[in-house]
Image (cartoon, rainbow, N blue to C red):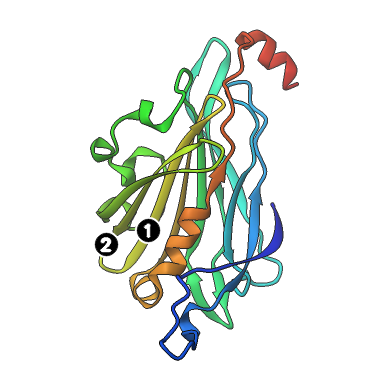
Amino acid sequence: MTTSRRVVAFAPVLASLAGAVSPSSAAIATRVITIDGQANERWVKIDATVNVPESWSTRPGQRAKSSAYVMYTDTYGPNNRWTWLSPKLSDDGVVEANALALTVQSKAGLESIEDFGAIEKIEPARAFGFELEGLSAADVVKSNTRTDKGGQKYYQWELDNGENFFGMVACVSGGALYAFVIEAASDKFKESPSTYRAVIDSFTVAKVDESRNDMSSRIYENR
């Protein structure tokens, strides 16, 4: 995982008739978190990126963790769902995000998230294998779609269980289904919804075609 710095406007810049800029709408410095792609014969290795406020940080020494869950085994071996999970992110000692998480799993033959199903028919709390406490009890409050400049299409959801907010986004690329979630206290989200929505909107996975090599060749390539 790597980070880099940039500045974005997390809310529209609003000016009064006198020309003054609202302090709450000032541009916020952000850092780009790059989640390294995983080499796997079932999908193309692709990095994922997401922007968070630069002031958000983990405690010294804490690192993101990754794990693999075997969904099933076939002729070619285990088919894993890969998960990346960050520690809590805080700003001056105040927790801003309980966790960031990413899951990647094989979805051969899908060219777009639309091929996974209509957004209104997907249950995001259960569809992607996230194991965050309280997520299964969260209700969908809002959903939408977006397409980035590279032509990648994303489904996005906002969920809440009364205590925690979950912002989710999913897409398909290179033979895999990618899903990202940011979890935060519901009260934190209500304080600054544009900040959390900006994180969700920034999640990016490049649009890449699935490998045309047969599985045996892919296994050899990944040794």
- Is residue 131 at all visible to an observer of this figure? no
* For the residues bearing labels 1 and 2, Cβ distance under 8 angstroms: yes
State the image coordinates of residue 206 (x, y, percent, origin top left): 59, 37
- Which secondary structure, mark 2? loop
Q: Is residue 201 left or right of residue 42?
A: left
User: Mark 1 Cα within 10 Å, few/some/many (few <14, many 20+)?
Assistant: many
| Label 1 – label 2 distance at C-alpha | 9 Å
Q: Kindly identify the residue that appears in the image at 38 percent across and 69 percent down.
A: 193
Give the quadrant of residue 211: top right
- Is residue 81 at all visible to an observer of this figure? yes
Looking at the picture, tell me which residue is in the foreground, 18 or 21. Answer: 18
Given the image, on which type of amino acid does mark 2 rest? Answer: Asn
Given the image, on which type of amino acid does mark 1 rest? Answer: Phe
Nearer mark to the viewer, of 1 and 2? 1
State the image coordinates of residue 52 (x, y, percent, origin top left): 57, 64
**In this view, 144 is above or below 192:** above
- Which secondary structure, mark 1? strand
Q: Is residue 161 left or right of residue 73?
A: left
Q: Is residue 59 left or right of residue 190?
A: right
Q: Kindly identify the residue that appears in the image at 69 percent across and 52 percent down.
A: 1
**In this view, 69 is above or below 182:** above
Residue 161's tag is: 2
The answer to which of marks 1 and 2 sits earlier in the sequence is 2
Q: Is residue 47 left or right of residue 183?
A: right
Label count reads 2
User: Which residue position is annotated with label 1?
Assistant: 166
User: Mark 2 Cα within 10 Å, few/some/many (few <14, many 20+)?
Assistant: some
